[in-house]
Amino acid sequence: MDTRDFEPVDPKCIVPIRIPPQTLRSRGWRQMKQNKLALLGLGIVVIMTSIAIFGPLVTSYTYDDQDFAMANAYPSPLHWFGTDSLGRDLLVRVLYGARISLSIGLAASLINLFIGVIYGGIAGLVGGRVDRIMMHIVDILYSIPMLLYVILLMVVFKPGLLNIYIALGIAYWLNMARIVRGQILSLKKQDYVMAARSYGTSTWHILTRHMIPNCMGPIIVTLTLSIPEAIFTEAFLSFIGLGVSAPMASWGVLTSEGINSMRSFPFQLIFPAAALCITMLGFMFLGDGLRDALDPQNQREGNR
Amino acid sequence: MKLLDIQHLTKKFVVESDWLGRPKKILTAVHDVSLAIEAGETVGLVGESGCGKSTFARTILGLYEKTHGTVLYKGRNIDQNGVHADFKRHVQMIFQDPYASLDPRMTVADSISEPLRNYHMCANNQDLKKRVFELLEQVDLNSEAAQRYPHEFSGGQRQRIGIARALALNPECIFCDEPISALDVSVQVQIVNMLKDLQQRFGLAYLFIAHDLSMVHHVSHRIGVMYLGKLVELGPGSTVYHDPLHPYTQSLIAAIPKPDPHAAPAVPAGGEVPSPLSLPSGCVFHPRCPYASELCRHESPVWREVQPGRFAACHHVRGGDVV
């Protein structure tokens, strides 16, 4: 073999390859873009949110305008979704329902994020006996059926929008607390947390610089998936009459009213029920997509 | 003066506790180990996995709370106020798994500058940046690496980032916790040579933990051998490697694969490593030791200087021989 076969490349010819640094976030987004269902979910969530915010502003009816001449009207150019038994425009009521349902989903999730992260964070970080007692409390609460718990809370609190926020918020943080605690416990044993301690990082900075950023993924996923749960629970409460009170309209109230006239005017049930289903599916698709995109296991395999 | 003098260090873990939190099962990971490290010296520490090498290093650094024992840093007890901060700043650590020891959500620059920020080593961001580039250069990495994330690097490169981070505080001693065992052989040599160069440049002392005796022999001035949480032999690197005294060290050396197809196959120490939860009576090595006698079964051997500069814990080591 001739040595000239292996002649070295002239260093001047070497062009350094420049690849922009990849953040984990950009990689998560790329993965998300490939997931059609998750994008659909994201689209639904964005559309539903903008409808909830801007929809009621551009309609010519309000949610409590009654027009008995038009009671139980079928869908028409005048009333796209028809009207209910009191002649109120159903489209506007569904739009207002979106406001109430989505705001309940969001508020309940934020309350449960707040309680869950703090509770789970303390249990995980302190560990030992404190952790054991705190988690036993969660286990006990977990063994009570959530719906029963919420119903009892609603009986005590009296129905009303603010009280629904509070009742759902304080009932659904258990999952979040468990997930955050698990994350913190496993992060505590990670080498990079050990390393951070070895070069003198304070506990506070370990928590804020290392632990919280690294458990953001599971927290966001749990949060996204808890929104439809809260919306559904609110719909259920309104359906059985413990939710928001008339003339306000959440999707649960609308379905409950629609069901009375299901035989004669099915559209009064179908429209709000469809809105509820589509939104829940949207959040679930989005949550599942986020879980896949933010899963660190996935990302590690992607680069090894 | 000795840079580090570790005396009678013991670390016990509670493996199981009852529902009130009282310990039920206790594992002694490190049992009464004494070891001194001089400035600029490399002390190798070898032993099977699970023998307590890493725990020993982490306990010295305070990553685990020690059960007994004292650590003297330049002759001062590190439990005293003031000494501890000084000690922590000057003794750093390199971790085994380069994939786990860097925070995946931090850029390389952030990771390397974190120790600098903890100790307020740099007056402003300009200084900080300059120092990070300087550190990257010391470990042969391009300054372009600073803005990247750990997942964009190979194992060897990540380990260098870990080394740069350990160097950031101008340490006097670095604990290398199996720094090469997760790497390819060719990369292992690079990293080891880099560590040797850095030692010469900065006068670093190393506690070099590994299970690969031939590599440890290559880098260490002195070698300590651990078995089930106890130090069984300590001596100058080449003597321990070529003329092992303790029966356990002998079997370790014999188990090193030789690049000679005609060599007689090594006879490994018989039996299994006993569970550290139920240690054998007397000398912990006696169930596997070819020299074991009645004395070994009942009485734990004392750690003593068998020859000038050589220590062993074995009833049967007399002078430079095993009888």
Image (spheres, coloured by chain):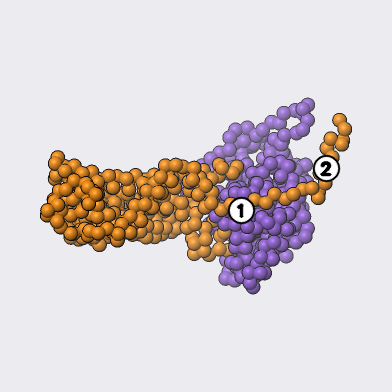
Residue pictured at 72% horizontal, 28% vertical = B265
A92 and B315: which is toward the camera:
A92
Residue pictured at 27% horizontal, 44% vertical = A274
Q: Disc 2 on helix, strand or loop? A: loop
Disc 1 target residue: A21
Mark 1, chain letter? A
A78 and A215: which is toward the camera:
A78
Q: Is residue A46 visible?
A: yes
Label disc, if present, on residue A8 of the rendered structure: 2
Q: Is residue B112 above or below residue A268?
A: below
Q: Mark 1: which amino acid?
A: Pro
Q: Mark 2: which amino acid?
A: Pro
Q: Disc 1 on helix, strand or loop? A: loop
In the rendered view, does B309 fall on the left or right side of B28?
right
A3 and A133: which is toward the camera:
A3
Chain B is shown in which shade? purple
Quadrant of the drawing holding the C terminus of chain B: top right
Q: Cα distance, mark 1 to mark 2?
A: 29 Å
Q: Residues within 10 Å of mark 1 (few under 14, many from 20)?
A: some
Residue pictured at 71% horizontal, 31% vertical = B266
Asked if the residue at tag 2 contacts the one at tag 1, i.e. Cβ–Cβ closer than 8 Å, the answer is no
Residue pictured at 21% horizontal, 44% vertical = A267
Q: Is residue A151 visible?
A: no
